[in-house]
Amino acid sequence: MTSMLRHIVLDGVNRTYYKSDPEWADYGLCVGYRYNVTGRDTVLHVHFCSDNASPDCISEAYGSTNGEEYCNVQRPFLRGTHLYSWYFGLDTKSPPYTLSDPDSGRIQRDYETIAAILILKSNHCHDIC
């Protein structure tokens, strides 16, 4: 099992954003993270960015995982060894409103907005998750 580098919990009340410390990553290995997103209208924004003079990023967004944990593998996008940082942000989307559903349109409470993230150490791409 791949060892964890850091465990982060974001919530809609106190902590909605996290930036990792820069870590060296080599193009020949992959990095990754496991995540679980709670809340019907929760959105987890993930950015994997190089810390070069002109930073580039790969950005993704995930909705609720319905209690499941998922793993995402990311290969560094610059050849060689470079510094990279993870950025995680938690947000809520506006709920849809349907006339036939009295529960639709309910605004999600801040305490219902949670994301648990495990940043994993770099490893061979097929072994990271």
Image: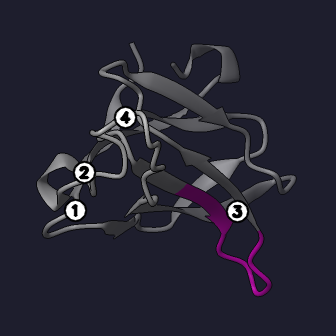
Judging from the image, the colouring scheme is one colour
Circle number at residue 121: none
Label drawn at residue 82: 3
Q: Is residue 56 above or below residue 129?
A: below
Mark 4 or mark 3: which comes first in sequence?
A: 3
Helix, strand or loop under label 3? strand
Residue under pointer 4: 101
Residue 8 in the image, given as x and y percentages of width and height: 26, 50
Q: Position of residue 30 (x, y in %)?
A: 66, 35
Q: Amino acid at mark 3?
A: His
SS class of the residue under badge 4?
Answer: loop
- Outermost residue on the front side: it is 100
Q: Residue flagged by tag 4: what amino acid is it?
A: Asp
Please tell me which of labels 4 and 1 falls first in the chain. 1
Q: Nearer the viewer, residue 15 or 106?
A: 106
Amino acid type at mark 1? Gly
Which of the two marks, 1 or 3, is nearer to us in this view? 1
Alpha carbons under labels 1 and 2: distance apart: 5 Å
Q: Residue at x 51, y 19 (%)?
A: 129
Q: Which residues are magenta?
A: 46-56
Which mark lies nearer to you, 2 or 3? 2
Q: Position of residue 22 (x, y in %)?
A: 50, 67
Mark pair 2, 3: CA separation: 33 Å
Question: How many angstroms separate mark 4 from mark 1 (CA)?
Answer: 25 Å
Where does label 2 land, which residue? Answer: 113
Where is residue 54 shown, x and y percent of the image? 80, 84
